[in-house]
Amino acid sequence: MPITENKIILVTGATGLAGSGLINSLLRNNYSVFALSRIPQATRHENLNWIKFDAMREEIIHILKDLPKIDGVIHAAAHIGHENTVTDIEKYRSINMEFSDNLFNYYAGQNVSIPIIYFSTLSSLQKPLNKIVSEEDKVSPNTFYSMSKYWGELSLLAYSKSSKIRPVIFRISSPVGNNLKHMHNTVIRKWIEAGKSDNNITVYGTGNRTQNFVSTSDIAEAALLCLKSNSVSGTFNIASGTSISMIELAKLIAGFFKVGIDYKNDENEVEENWNISIHKATESFGYKPGFSSTETINNLLQNTIEDSRNK
């Protein structure tokens, strides 16, 4: 494996929604990267080292022992979902909990002063949400997924108290990439795929619920800022700083593809408003998102069309 004199960063979940864009940002900023991925990748770069790894079936310790001195870890790997099947629960336990714990435990025991940036979620917050969502809000996970991610936060903080590792926790709002194939099976993906097929978009309920969509490029920029700092630690909301309602989102996507919108009642609708404060991240390490929620969606729509034309 080629090693340069640049700082070396270990990235887990390197082919996921947030991880894939993160790799490119690190390379552009002259970092050397060891990227863990369950799926083999074709991308090649002199400072990029792919390591095939399956957290469900392999022990991470053996891989970590063979790596050179690491200057920072970005832990983006996770099983993401909101299902509670036996298979999903096992993945939450194995990947989100056991794998995270083994990773944190290993570097806590290496007597190294390095940042470990953990990609967590805002879905663990207690409902109903406060008018302005901050890092001080109460946590009350109501799914196995959110519970497993919050458990990872607690694990990292616990290991940091008895070691030199510097914990940095990103509670990320709804991430949106520039490529539809990397997007999770969310309402955005469903509506874009419907629009691409010239089908109407279906909005359930009033559409008044608001969401904060953050560009994966902004998540990557936040990680870079923390890697360059020698002191940042703690828990931070990483969001776009702007919100958009579901009806506004539907109109944006429907207008782009020139399709209609169907409205259906939803007796179980809960109108949440994700007004997320990013003040702490801005004050602590200068985080300033480059894209609003609307701009983030527009970028995805434009890239989706360009990708279709290039096929």
Image (tube, helix red, strand yellow):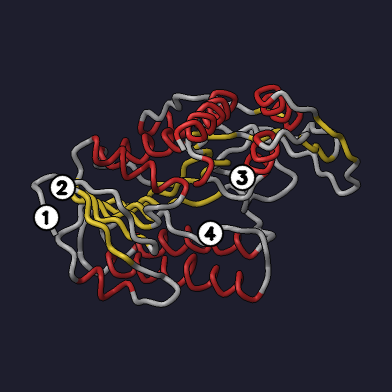
- Residue closer to the observer: 19 or 208: 19
Q: Which mark is residue 46?
A: 2
Give the label, 2 or 3, closer to the camera: 2
Place of residue 217 in the rendered image (x, y in percent of width and height, measured from the top left) = 41, 34
The residue drawn where x is 15% and y is 59% is 69
Q: Which residue is mark 1?
A: 2
Q: Check if mark 2's residue and mark 1's residue have beta carbons within 8 Å.
A: yes
Identify the residue shown where x is 73% and y is 48%: 127
Drawn side of residue 185 relative to residue 36, left or right: right
**Cα–Cα gap, marks 2 and 1:** 7 Å
Q: Which mark's residue is nearer the viewer, 3 or 4?
A: 4
Comparing 109 with 262, the one in front is 262
Contact (Cβ within 8 Å) of mark 4 with mark 2: no
Percent from the top left, x then y, of residue 280? 46, 34
Residues 305 and 238: in front is 305
**Distance from Cα at disc 2 to Cα at disc 3:** 43 Å
Horizontal side, residue 253 vs residue 311: left or right: right
Q: Residues within 10 Å of mark 1 (few under 14, many from 20)?
A: few
